[in-house]
Amino acid sequence: MKLLFIIRDVRGWAGTERVTSLIANALAESHTVEVLSLSQKPTTQVNKEHTQERTQTLTKKLIAQLPQGYSYQPSIEISYIPARNDMLNLCITTIKIAHHLAKGNYDVVVLSGVGEIKFLLGAIHFCRSKFVAWEHFNAAHTHKRVNRKVAARLCDAIVVLTKADADDWQRYLHPHGRIAYIPNPLAEMPALPSILSEKRVLALGRLEEQKRFDLLIEAFSLMHREYPDWHLRIRGSGSKEPVLRQFIQELELTSAVEILPPVTDVASEYREASIYALSSKFEGFPMTLVEAMSFGIPCVSFNCPNGPDEIIADGDDGFIVPYDDVPGFATAMIQLAEDPTLRHQMGQRARQHIQRFDLAHIQVLWEDLIDQLCQK
């Protein structure tokens, strides 16, 4: 079958781009796959007066400076149609995409990110393809947006990441097509887990209101009173960084809490952590929990919608705490800090249980969805 994935920017480094590359690469083993990026095609300008050797060196340097994004199989064609939101360009882009889809004659088109469905209105009405909207966020927080309502009415299927989100789509949006629950995959199982010896709590994510790192810092301050040799490391960037740094100073935790920029080698961060903490107000599907557990790290998470309670088995391979219960969050971290045996037992079970998100298993779910759509 011929499949097309449409994504806002194929060169991005966020979670949506990551899982899109994983699924597209996996499906390319048995299908013809193309990825259409709604961004400007990267170009390099080379002065023709340079010698051939100088030209090659300059080209490599310019290419190295471009944000490359996640890698795709050589068999996957990458196409570009730059999209902008002003009315004129919206109309032009919609026409270009409809023409691209009609010419490509795709069996299934997967829109990775529901927000861009406005660019597909022409194609959905005039192309024979089956259309899938892949939801990466939380329907309970986004269901009032027009793009979700349009997707619910026009798409043949909605792919959601959690069972709770499937219920929310049905409750709020009543889609005409089917709802398919397909979690995000774990890229690979780490060969070496964390040895859980470092006295470090780790948290990763954007420094924005959604992540509520202020609550995590407050909970850690309670833990730190009893275990002053433990540290908290937060890796991320965002608008809340100055406020969070000020809060750390007010709590006199500057020597115990550090905020560092995002890092590409996130595996090294997991291997040096002994507890992973997630303090979000809401999530779509918190992949950092899945990744941390694959490294054998017990996790403590607020029971936010959606995902943590479908990933962590409370009291077995980690802890789920009611949202905003800062003392409860601190107590869970203290339990893991004071009991190395519990920490290791939970970590081992986490590493075992998380294998249900193995890429091969998730690939089968996507294959089944594609087959069912194309049989109609």
Image: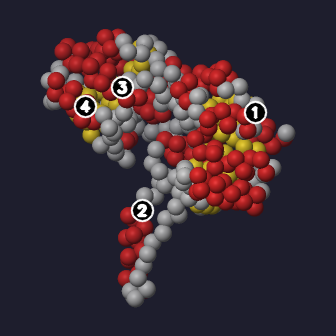
From the image, tell me which residue sits under label 1. 177
In this view, the residue in front, 54 or 158, is 158
Residue 54: which numbered mark, if any?
Answer: none
Q: Specify few, some or many for label 4: CA neighbours under 10 Å numbering under 14, 14-19, or 20 or more.
A: few
- Residue at 41 percent across and 25 percent down: it is 280
The CA distance from mark 1 to mark 4 is 44 Å
Type of amino acid under label 3 = Arg
Q: Name the spot of residue 353 as percent of width and height, x first.
A: 52, 25
From the image, tell me which residue sits under label 3. 212
Q: Name the spot of residue 131 as percent of width and height, x first.
A: 72, 43
Quadrant of the rendered image containing residue 93: bottom right
The CA distance from mark 2 to mark 1 is 39 Å
Q: Is residue 32 visible?
A: no
Q: Earlier in the sequence, mark 3 or mark 2?
A: 2
From the image, tell me which residue sits under label 4. 243
Compared to residue 163, the image places residue 263 above or below, namely: below
Which mark is nearer the camera, 4 or 2? 4
Q: Earlier in the sequence, mark 3 or mark 4?
A: 3
In this view, the residue in front, 239 or 335, is 239
Compared to residue 219, the image places residue 146 above or below, namely: below
Secondary structure state at the residue bearing disc 3: loop
